[in-house]
Image (cartoon, rainbow, N blue to C red):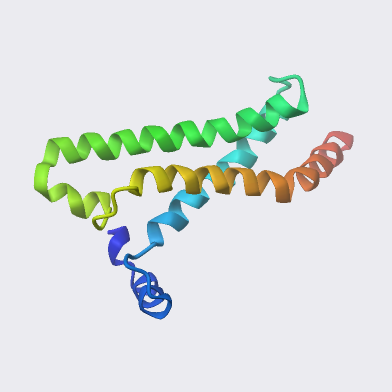
Amino acid sequence: TYAEMPLFDYFKEVFGWTRNNYDKVGHFMQGFSPALIAREVFIRQNIINGKWWTLFLAVAVPLAFSAFYEFVEWWVAVATGDSAEAFLGTQGYVWDTQTDMFMCLTGSILSLIIFSRLQDRQIIEMEKN
């Protein structure tokens, strides 16, 4: 499970964390990469007019997927009862769902801040050829 990732068990000891935070990296990446993919699809297919709407929806797509994933985790927890803890990996953290969503949001926004200009240049270059 995410809660038993050995490298992050080591980090837990080194940094004095109370939990294994490997799942947070996964949720960060759940926002980071899909935001760039969504943005590129919106631009290349000319689906959305306007830079700000494109950015907003490029963040909204991975965030919606992340919310759906959290619902799936919840449904599994309801269906399996006590054994859900291993699947969920909440490690007793009551804000796990909210911080998972926040990590996805952070990953989405950060990827767009870092890579939007590069992505624009690459799209223009591809359209020239």
Residue at 41% x, 80% y is 14
Q: Residue at x 70, y 23 (%)?
A: 45
Residue 79 rendering spot, x and y as whole percentages: 14, 36
Q: Quadrant of the N terminus?
A: bottom left
Question: Residue 38, how many percent across, how many down?
Answer: 61, 33
109 horizontally vs 50: left or right: left
Q: Residue furthest bottom?
A: 14
Query: From what the image shows, is residue 68 above or below residue 48?
Result: below
Does 22 appear above or below 76?
below
| Residue ranking furthest to the right | 128
Residue at the image point whose x is 17% and y is 47% from the top: 84
User: Which image quadrant is residue 39 in?
Assistant: top right
Asked whether 39 or 110 is in front, the reply is: 110
Lateral position of residue 34 relative to residue 97, left or right: right
Q: Position of residue 124 (x, y in %)?
A: 85, 37
Total numbered badges shown on the rendered structure: 0
- Give the quadrant of residue 77: top left
| Residue 63 shown left or right of residue 19 in the figure | right
- At 68% across and 44% down in the image, what residue appears? 112
Q: Is 50 left, or right, of 67 in this rendering?
A: right
